[in-house]
């Protein structure tokens, strides 16, 4: 029970950070909407996916924003490590990893809010999801799992690197991952090497499953690979973050 | 005597670099003890071991009756650490920082709010309480940092270089905060590079240099280790200097360039009067006199070499 209080207190702290930071708010809300508008109105006219491009690209944008938003956790964790907050927390009778859990959970909450904003803007632009209430629940669950997995990896990265610049670099890596997937264009249009990468990386099944949940066709979606990818990354991220936390703080 | 902090033969290396090569430290309950030394002397490493952040390689380290390697959780319940950087959350307000720390120490919401109010008042932070810490001056942030470390009423407080990087006014603010603690029964171990700070705040001082203890004692004991007070006589010319040296039978250090004579005394007024009477009797014209008490700086320089190496 006390662990829940600790984690809850630290989640509250991270949520306040996001709410009060102008930068974080811009990254979390404005940037995803700008990316959506760019893809739909700047690039979308020239991209032929055989369907309405807005409908095609919204799940991709959602995943892009989730991946990019998760990377912010790396900067927050690194900041706590370099400013002595980690040492202070560790000299308390507190489970040290509560701090990491707080960052990751707050990141998921922040990300879900920005996802909701992106979908709301998309609906204003003409996106018409055909999802049932159950589909929406499953969508939220899959996204939360995806965000937690990338958040845990980001936490590990934030503990691994020395400074905030290197911590921030993860955002670019995670920002590019969805480009080489079915998020923005069908992978069949890519060269063979990239097509192979697109088929064997986590964002492709996640995007495809979201597409199926939001627009129909859930029966044939790669939901199982999507969940397995996310669960695997979550376990790997938690293990790496735990090991690095012990190493960087002793 | 039961010590709140008892360290014997503490050793710690980081890879091939020895940070501590055998440190002993004994701090009685309720006292303020200073670890004094230059950068790299091992002050912070000692504090990290005591605060359970770093495991010792060898030696016995007991804090409030609990061994840091065997019962780290029990140690953490009674200690509090204020590290070199003010570990305050700059995005939160001062009050929110205090409430968060109280919640992390398992206080209820109501208790946490009450504790925050008490500490804000005690450390003169009420005006700043609801501003974000990012807007605080360095001294105010440090006061909050110390207030944060008192949440949960720890028995032992570690302050690692609490005034490093602060301007003189902020430093005095922090000193006042530490003096306020000293009266409350908390045992305080502080590290500092400033001799003046150790002299002013600490009951006893351990001088660390190169990972080992160079000296230990009260400020007065350390000063007396390098001799008593000296009286400096400034003379008008070389002939007078020579006459003055003859008058004291050569028992003095002369500074020919500065035309002055340094005589070691017991520090009493009578000794100064006798010395001047002796000069007057021999018609030695003394222009000015100055009395020098050894500062802790003198002690420090006498005990440590140029790079913090113990002088042979």
Image: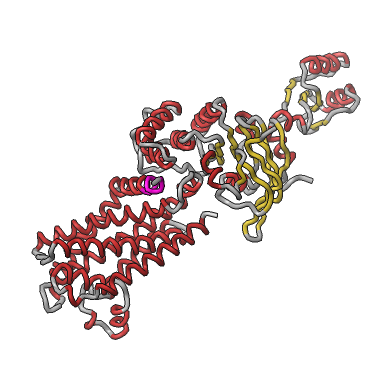
Q: Is residue A239 left or right of residue A55?
A: right
Q: Is residue B246 left or right of residue A238?
A: right
- Name the image quarter holding the N terminus of chain B: top right
What residue is shown at x 81% (from left), y 17% (from top)?
Answer: B271
As for residue A6 lying within the magenta part, the answer is yes
Q: Main secondary structure of the magenta part?
A: helix
What residue is shown at x 18% (from left), y 65% (from top)?
Answer: A38
The answer to which image quadrant residue B33 occupies is top right
Specify whether residue B306 is in view: no
- Magenta stretch in the rendered image: A2-7
As for residue B120 lying within the magenta part, the answer is no
User: Is residue B211 positioned above or below B220 on the image?
Assistant: below
Residue at the bottom extreme of this rendering:
A192
State the residue in front, B38 or B105: B105
User: Is residue A152 positioned above or below B265 on the image?
Assistant: below
User: Is residue B237 positioned above or below A11 on the image?
Assistant: above
Coloring applied to the structure: secondary structure
User: Is residue B294 positioned above or below A132 on the image?
Assistant: above
Specify whether residue B288 is in view: yes
The answer to which image quadrant residue B235 occupies is top right
**Image position, residue A111 (x, y; %):** 27, 57
What residue is shown at x 81% (from left), y 26% (from top)?
Answer: B264
- Across the whole image, how many numbered discs are drawn on residues? 0
**Image position, residue B146 (x, y; %):** 49, 35
**Image position, residue B8 (x, y; %):** 70, 44
**Image position, residue B81 (x, y; %):** 52, 41
Q: Is residue A69 left or right of residue A132?
A: right
């Amino acid at each position: 029970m006390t662990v829940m209080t600790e984690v809850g207190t630290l989640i509250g702290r991270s949520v306040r950070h996001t709410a009060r930071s102008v930068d974080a708010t811009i990254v979390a809300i404005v940037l995803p909407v700008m990316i959506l508008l760019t893809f739909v109105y700047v690039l979308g006219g020239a991209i032929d996916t055989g369907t309405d491009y807005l409908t095609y690209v919204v799940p991709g944008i959602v995943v892009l924003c989730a991946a990019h938003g998760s990377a912010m956790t790396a900067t927050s964790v690194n900041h706590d490590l370099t400013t002595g907050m980690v040492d202070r927390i560790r000299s308390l009778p507190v489970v040290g990893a509560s701090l990491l859990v707080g960052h990751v959970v707050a990141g998921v909450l922040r990300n879900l809010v920005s996802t909701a904003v992106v979908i709301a803007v998309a609906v204003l632009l003409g996106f018409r999801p055909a999802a049932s209430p159950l589909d929406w629940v499953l969508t939220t669950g899959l996204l939360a799992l995806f965000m937690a997995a990338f958040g845990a990896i980001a936490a590990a990265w934030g503990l691994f690197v020395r400074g905030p610049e290197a911590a921030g670099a993860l955002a670019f890596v995670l920002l590019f991952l969805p480009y080489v997937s079915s998020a923005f264009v069908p992978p069949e249009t890519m060269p063979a090497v990239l097509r192979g990468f697109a088929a064997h990386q986590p964002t492709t099944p996640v995007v495809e499953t979201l597409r199926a949940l939001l627009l129909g066709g859930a029966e044939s979606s790669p939901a199982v690979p999507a969940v397995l990818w996310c669960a695997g990354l979550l376990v790997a991220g938690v293990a790496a973050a735990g090991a690095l936390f012990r190493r960087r703080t002793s | 005597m039961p010590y709140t902090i008892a360290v014997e033969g503490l050793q710690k290396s980081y890879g091939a670099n020895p940070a501590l090569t055998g440190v002993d430290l004994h701090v009685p309950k309720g006292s303020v003890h200073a670890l004094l030394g230059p950068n790299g002397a091992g002050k912070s490493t000692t504090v990290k071991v005591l605060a359970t952040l770093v495991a010792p390689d060898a030696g016995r380290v007991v804090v409030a009756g609990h061994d840091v390697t065997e019962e780290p959780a029990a140690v953490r319940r009674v200690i509090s650490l204020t590290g070199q950087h003010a570990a305050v959350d700059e995005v939160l307000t001062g009050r929110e920082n205090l409430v968060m720390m109280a919640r992390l120490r398992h206080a209820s919401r109501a208790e946490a709010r009450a504790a925050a109010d008490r500490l804000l008042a005690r450390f003169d932070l009420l005006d700043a309480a609801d501003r974000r810490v990012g807007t605080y001056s360095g001294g105010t942030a440090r006061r909050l940092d110390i207030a944060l470390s008192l949440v949960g009423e720890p028995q032992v407080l570690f302050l690692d270089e609490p005034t490093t990087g602060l301007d003189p006014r902020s430093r005095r603010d922090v000193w006042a905060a530490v003096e306020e603690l000293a009266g409350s029964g908390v045992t305080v171990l502080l590290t500092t590079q400033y001799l003046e700070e150790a002299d002013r705040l600490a009951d006893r001082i351990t001088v660390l240099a190169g990972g080992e203890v160079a000296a230990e004692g009260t400020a007065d004991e350390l000063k007396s280790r390098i001799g008593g007070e000296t009286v400096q006589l400034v003379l008008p010319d070389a002939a007078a200097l020579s006459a003055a040296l003859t008058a004291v039978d050569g028992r003095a250090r002369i500074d020919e360039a500065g035309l002055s004579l340094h005589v070691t005394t017991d520090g009493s007024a009578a000794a100064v009067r006798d010395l001047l009477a002796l000069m007057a009797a021999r018609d030695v014209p003394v222009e000015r006199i100055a009395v020098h008490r050894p500062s802790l700086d003198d002690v420090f320089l006498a005990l440590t070499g140029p790079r913090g190496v113990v002088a042979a």
